[in-house]
Amino acid sequence: MTLNLEQIRKDFPILERETRPGVRVTYLDSTATSQKPVQVIEAMNDYYRRSNANIHRGVHTLAEEATSMYEGAREKIAKFINASSSREVIYTRNTTESINLVAYSWARANLKAGDLVILTEMEHHSNLVPWHMLQAERGIELEFIPVTDDGLLDLETYKSLLSRRPKLVSFTHMSNVLGTINPAAEIIRLAHETGAVALVDGAQSVPHLQVDVQALDADFYAFSAHKMCGPTGIGALYGKTSLLEAMPPFLGGGDMIKEVKLRSFRANTLPHKFEAGTPAIAEAVGFGAAVDYLSAIGMDKIAAYEHEITEYALDRLEEIPGVKLFGPSADKKGGVAAFTLEGVHPHDVAQILDRDGIAVRAGHHCAQPLHEKFGIQATSRASFYLYSTKGEVDLLVNGIYKVKEMFG
């Protein structure tokens, strides 16, 4: 079944926006952040208008409503990724903070000098820098699964690295540059066979694919609301109960404690143990509303539609002389098309496209090592979501031809 694209686009008010008179926005930057449907906007607005209060502490009506909405959203998120319990879903600010939580809590409690962490060459900086910091602090070792010329992970090299008995394997489920959808279940299974823990960066996968953390057998899985039709400033870390219970708290303060004395404290139970201070309550409500929105449409339908539009986009872009695409074929990737245009800097491409209201990304996309791997400093990146259309792809292609004309 296809998506009701006309109705879906009506749900996103910003798609009616004109960036200048007569120029409607063509939003092709959903990998950076998705747009928000009116259902999410109204859910957050309703919380502030009707139920705004702090959670967990109060017994008055507003506090109980706020708590119910906050924890109800957690239940929805747990169901969305098929966690075995909502206690395994920790609210964070974003995917970056989720990965840092693992690095600061689990890793600092379990890793010592000489221990090996395996990453990949296609990682976002959020899944590189925390481990560089730990390497500088603890003397852990880092090794990287190479990326092949066609944008896939070299799993044979991965298998050879596993012979060194790593303690952690941390990798992206879907590349934010290449769009590559990595074989997460296989990578995790191989990691577990050597006794390693597996952490997955799901920032790009959860918004676009049906993710089942139990089927994957992931130990940790990190993702953000803002890339999946939800608000900025909130994300989630899934972790297996046994791991989370054994980990020390990440931040200290209110709500993460069971008891405090002048000279000691006892940490709270899961998930509150990792959620210090007043949280992003309205954002959690919006997160839950985003999950409701995506669930009502169906993640399988969304994935199928995105595959269709990505295949169309890659075919159209390949027609343009001087365009070089990066990443695998459409059947192995999500809705991302990173490219260069011969003789034109990616920032110039993006700036000129913006004159016609076409929003694409330009730069290294927080993946400098990956760009260095391909011998380039930057790419232009168009990315698609459930509200994107083939007509918008055509506008992009026409816009690139205009860029070519301007630069001769």
Image: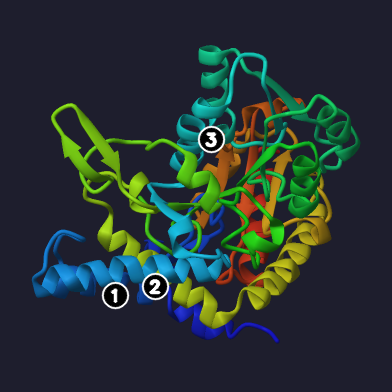
Q: Which of marks 2 and 1 is nearer the N terminus?
A: 1
Q: Which of marks 3 and 1 is nearer the N terminus?
A: 1
Q: Which residue is drawn at 61% across and 56% down?
A: 383
For badge 2, the amino acid type reads Ala
Residue 271 x/y as whole percent: 39, 53
For badge 1, the amino acid type reads Glu
Q: Earlier in the sequence, mark 3 or mark 2?
A: 3
The answer to whether residue 90 is left or right of residue 27 is left
Q: Residues within 10 Å of mark 3 (few under 14, many from 20)?
A: some
Residue 107 x/y as whole percent: 54, 30
Q: Quadrant of residue 193?
A: top right
Q: In which quarter of the image is residue 15?
A: bottom left
The answer to whether residue 192 is left or right of residue 283 is right
Q: Which residue is drawn at 26% across and 60% down?
A: 281
Q: Is mark 2 on a helix, strand or loop?
A: helix
Q: What element carries label 3?
A: helix
Q: Which residue is drawn at 44% across and 56% down?
A: 226
